[in-house]
């Protein structure tokens, strides 16, 4: 796809990307084997491992965890009231969409406690090994500490498009807005009313501005990372996109990312 040629003109030292369709990878650009820091794209992988634990009945979405009254469902959807980088309360469960990396660290600890498996090993066994993601590792906090490459994340995105790891009802719930109507912030993009989120996946909804394209459907879900990384899945389009860079997210990425993503959508529609 010619749209991926645009990546070579991005103001970054290194970049790689892939577009994925129902049948697998459609097109790639750059060194897709190069490993990058994922930052918060890590949360997609961690959420998937937590949801496998739900399917395996090690935990439940209603399992209490973190702050009083909060559950696994609250933490996955950033609705527990937990602060961004500490486990202090900033609101009651279900009151606001407060983006919390600390919440994902709490979830990882819960899975470890209920499975007796270190979370980084559980992630490997539950997600990476079944999908052949041989270059992916969680080497830091569960909220932002994974490293991976485009080859691996293309496999992961393919599974999000056509779920095999999760039970159909679990996969559907993950891509459905949890606690609808909550307002909140998307880091770097300001406050949104509402700020839609699924079970670990940010859902585009009607957010503006946003890192996905305005041409992406409202049901588009995924995540971006402060490392200059993003992954989205558009179920209406039937396609996904992964881009990894080594330049931290900042002004350079806006509106570049959304313009690029619009170009991806428009080229796939042709």
Image (cartoon, grey):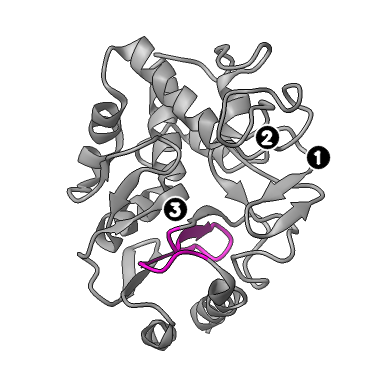
Contact (Cβ within 8 Å) of mark 2 with mark 3: no
Determine the residue positioned at 68% across, 60% down. Answer: 189
Which image quarter: residue 207?
A: bottom right
Crowd class of label 1 (few under 14; some 14 to 19; many from 20; radius 10 Å): some
Is residue 257 something that shows in the picture?
Answer: no
In the rendered structure, which segment of residues is drawn in magenta?
Answer: 227-249
Residue 264: where, in percent of width, then height?
A: 50, 77
Viewer-side label of 3, 1: 1
Q: Is residue 260 magenta?
A: no
Asked if 197 appears above or below 207 in the picture, the reply is above
Q: Give the SS element for disc 2.
A: loop
Q: Quadrant of the N terminus?
A: bottom left
Question: Which residue does the numbered mark 3 point to in the structure image?
Answer: 161
Q: Give the SS element for disc 1.
A: loop
Is residue 106 something that shows in the picture?
Answer: yes
Determine the residue positioned at 30% across, 59% down. Answer: 36
Question: Which residue does the numbered mark 1 point to in the structure image?
Answer: 181
Q: Is residue 241 magenta?
A: yes
Compared across the picture, whether 109 is left or right of 213 comes to left
Q: Give the SS element for disc 3.
A: helix
Crowd class of label 3 (few under 14; some 14 to 19; many from 20; radius 10 Å): many
Question: Label for residue 178?
Answer: 2
């Amino acid at each position: 796809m010619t749209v991926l040629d645009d990546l070579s003109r991005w103001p970054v030292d290194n970049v790689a990307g892939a577009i994925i369709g129902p049948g697998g990878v459609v097109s790639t650009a750059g060194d897709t084997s190069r490993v990058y820091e994922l930052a918060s794209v890590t949360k997609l992988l961690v959420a998937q491992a937590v949801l496998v634990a739900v399917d395996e009945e090690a935990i439940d979405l209603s399992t209490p965890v973190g702050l009083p009254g909060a559950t696994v469902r609250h933490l996955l959807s950033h609705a527990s009231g937990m602060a961004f980088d500490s486990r202090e309360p900033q609101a009651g469960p279900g009151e606001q969409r407060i983006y919390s990396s600390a919440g994902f660290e709490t979830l990882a600890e819960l899975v470890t406690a209920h499975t007796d498996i270190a979370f980084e090993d559980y992630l490997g066994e539950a997600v990476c090994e079944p999908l052949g993601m041989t270059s992916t590792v969680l080497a830091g906090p569960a909220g932002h500490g994974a490293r991976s490459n485009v080859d691996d994340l293309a496999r992961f995105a393919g599974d999000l498009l056509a779920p095999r790891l999760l039970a159909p009802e679990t996969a559907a719930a993950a891509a459905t807005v949890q606690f609808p109507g909550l307002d909140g912030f998307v880091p770097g993009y300001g406050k949104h009313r509402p700020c839609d989120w699924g079970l670990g996946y940010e859902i585009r909804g009607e957010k503006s501005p946003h890192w996905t394209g305005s041409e992406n459907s409202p049901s588009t879900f995924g995540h971006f990372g402060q490392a200059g990384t993003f992954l989205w899945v558009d179920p209406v389009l039937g396609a996904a996109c992964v881009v990894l860079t080594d330049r931290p997210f900042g002004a350079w990425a806006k509106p570049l990312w959304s313009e690029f993503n619009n170009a991806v959508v428009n080229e796939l529609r042709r």
